[in-house]
Image (cartoon, helix red, strand yellow):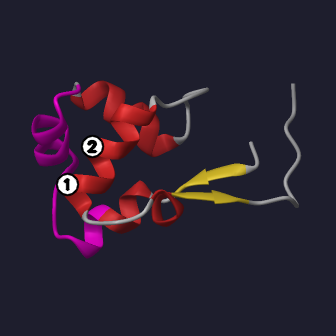
Amino acid sequence: MPIIVRLDVMLARRKMTSRDLAARIGISEQNLSLLRSGKVRGVRFNTLEAICRELDCQPGDLLEFDGGQTEVG
C-alpha cells in the first residue's frame, strides 16, 4: 500500500505507549495496533483528529505517501 503509517515514530518521539494513546482517545488497543501496522483500509477523521491532538502533531506527521510502491492484490 502506498500510504505508510508513521504512528510508531510519533509515539516514540512523545515517549508514549500505544496503550496510553488508545486509552486517551477512546479506541481499543487492537484497533490502534491495526492502524499502526497499516492493516486498515481507512481511518475516521475524528480518530485522526484525536491522535493528532494527543500527540501534538499534524496528520502529515502520521501518514506518508510513497508513490514508488504498488499495491498487490
Q: Is residue 66 left or right of residue 27?
A: right
Q: Secondary structure at mark 2?
A: helix
> Residue 30 occupies which quadrant of the picture?
top left
Q: Is residue 1 left or right of residue 27?
A: right
Q: Nearer the viewer, residue 57 or 9?
A: 57
Q: Secondary structure at mark 1?
A: helix
Q: Is residue 52 left or right of residue 41?
A: left
Q: Which residues are magenta?
A: 11-27
Q: Residue at x 47, y 58 (%)?
A: 62
**Pointer 2 residue:** 50
Say if mark 2 contacts mark 1, CB within 8 Å. yes
- Image quarter (top left, top right, bottom left or bottom right) of the N terminus: top right
Question: Looking at the rendered structure, which numbered label has been put on residue 64?
Answer: none
Q: Is residue 72 left or right of residue 46?
A: right
Q: Residue at x 17, y 54 (%)?
A: 17
Q: Position of residue 11 (x, y in %)?
A: 28, 62
**Pointer 1 residue:** 54
Q: Residue at x 23, y 31 (%)?
A: 29
> Residue 54 occupies which quadrant of the picture?
bottom left
Measure how far apart labels 2 and 1 are at the Cα level.
6 Å
Q: Is residue 13 magenta?
A: yes
Q: Main secondary structure of the magenta part?
A: helix
Q: Position of residue 65 (x, y in %)?
A: 71, 58
Q: Nearer the viewer, residue 26 or 46?
A: 46
Q: Residue at x 47, y 56 (%)?
A: 59
Q: Give the answer, above or below, for where 31 lies relative to 6.
A: above
